[in-house]
Amino acid sequence: MSAPIIWIGIPMIFSLILFFIRASRVITLIIGGGISAFLALLALTFKIESVFPLGPLSMEISSTLTILGRNFVITDSERFIVAFMFSMCAFWIFGSRISGTNSFFVPNVLAIITLFVAALSVQPFLYAALIIEIAVLISIPIFFQRGQPVKQGIIRFLVFQTLAIPFILFSGWGFAAAPSSINSQATYFQAGVLLAIGLGLWLAIFPFHTWVPLLARDGHPYSAGFILSMLPTTILIFFLDFLNTFSWLREQSILLSISQNLGIVMIVMGGLFAAFQRELTRLIGYAVMVEIGFSLLAMSLNQIIGWQSYILVMIPRIIGIAICTLAISIWKNKELNMDIDGFHGEFYKSTFAMVGFLVGWFTFSGLPLLPGFPTKLPILIGLSQITLTSIIFVSIGLFGLFVAGFRFLAIIFSTRNNEDKIETESLLQKIFFSFGVVLLLAMGIFPSLVLNPFLEILSAFANLN
């Protein structure tokens, strides 16, 4: 038995089965979430390349599976990445119970996460681009909303993700051909430029960022939140492998400088756009831009504190996006006006959803006692040792998120025309939002206890430690 069969083959088979029985929503949710949680637990407990006694028999989990000359390799140090991916898969699947997503969500999400794991494990790495493109194509049905046509944001998302593929493929070819090239330095440089463009399209880095707020507006909020959190997370881990394999990339000061400047631009733009944005769905897109900006800043530090922050900012980001988009989905299902002014007095009707949304939003803002603070603070400290000017611009971006949050906070407590203060939330909604809020608070108050175990992900990248 090989690790790729367990963590790629088996969940892919289950996703196909769930696709054909997707009309049974509760059954697909229980099976999809259950298999994801089981695979995450299995990755945490079973060591790869070890022999396990099973009564009179024994079983060894090998790390490699070869298909058509291509190797899928999941080493023991990479099983923490696998556990992380499938635990997040279970989190998103169980949350979909109250989000109002369509019947494609559970089977397609399980398939997408499985393909992400396959993309991170395939060798040669350039095939990862093709696998990620398949995952993008599979993601399109989960955005569909009953009675609505395919909108601009979904199409633009597909176009930008597809445009990234040739750049990634050509960069992979360049990195492979450079050692035997007459002018290897020039070949490496050209491949690096192609890689940067491809990653820019994938991660919606300026100036390729326009699809993010549009997707948040036009797709189903919860489905858009899943893609806006898990796709960048996969790409960022994929890029870590590049930096770990090609050490000369980390030594290019121009690359680090560009990453730092683009990160600052993403944070400032996202924060300022959020401060003046009135449509709640688009706010999540701008928060994602800020979060990607912080990942770029963490990478630009090129030191252990930066790599640790690079990993740690991912965790509260995913949870925050999930809880915010879950709240928006519920409000949208109630046919509320998504303009901020339409939420006057809504706190009294959707108390748990409102608290969940605000905790998630101020996590993006870096409010103390929430996990955005201990994960972003080391990045700011490292950046301050390089230049104080950058800190000013980053502070402007974060201030924009605070403005958006407090403006929304002021509106939800105000009422108009003596509106009735009626509690309309179900018990299941209260449980989900309470769990999300407690989880984020635990991460913020006890980061060393809750977040630091995720640093085991870095063990897969020995050259970065």
Image (tube, rainbow, N blue to C red):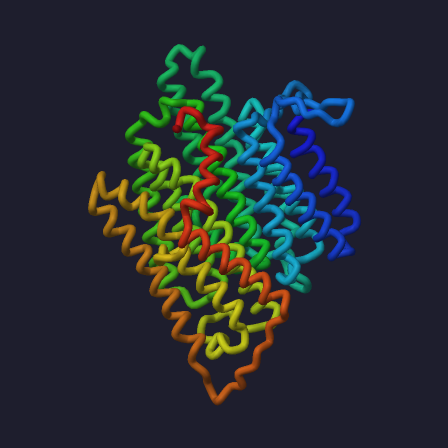
Give residue 254's position: percent from left, percent from top: 29, 31
Query: Picture coordinates of residue 124 (x, y %)?
Result: 56, 22
Q: Give residue 17's quadrant in the image.
A: top right
User: Would residue 171 appear left or right of 407 to someone viewing this image?
Assistant: right
Q: Is residue 126 above or below residue 384?
A: above
Number of marks drawn = 0
| Residue 49 as seen in the image, left or right of residue 203 | right
Q: Is residue 340 left or right of residue 90?
A: left
Which quadrant of the rendered structure holds the N terminus? top right
Q: Is residue 207 visible?
A: no
Q: Nearer the viewer, residue 398 or 168?
A: 398
Vertical relation: 90 (above or below) 329? above
**Left or right of 315 in this view: 107:** right
Pinpoint residue 455: horizontal percent, then vertical percent. Answer: 45, 37
Task: Work out which quarter of the rendered image holds the C terminus and state it.
Answer: top left
- Residue 30 versus residue 302 in the image, above or below: below
As drawn, which residue projects farthest toward the left?
A: 388
Q: Nearer the viewer, residue 51 or 220?
A: 51
Q: Which residue is depicted at the point 50% across and 37% down? A: 164
Residue 297 position, x and y percent, is: 34, 41
Q: Can residue 394 be seen by looking at this rendering?
A: yes
Residue sitting at x 32%, y 32%: 303
Q: Which residue is farthest bottom? A: 418
Nearer to the camera, 180 or 355: 355
Quadrant hosting residue 112? top right
Residue at the limit of the structure toward the front, as seen here: 55
Q: Is residue 429 above or below residue 206?
A: below
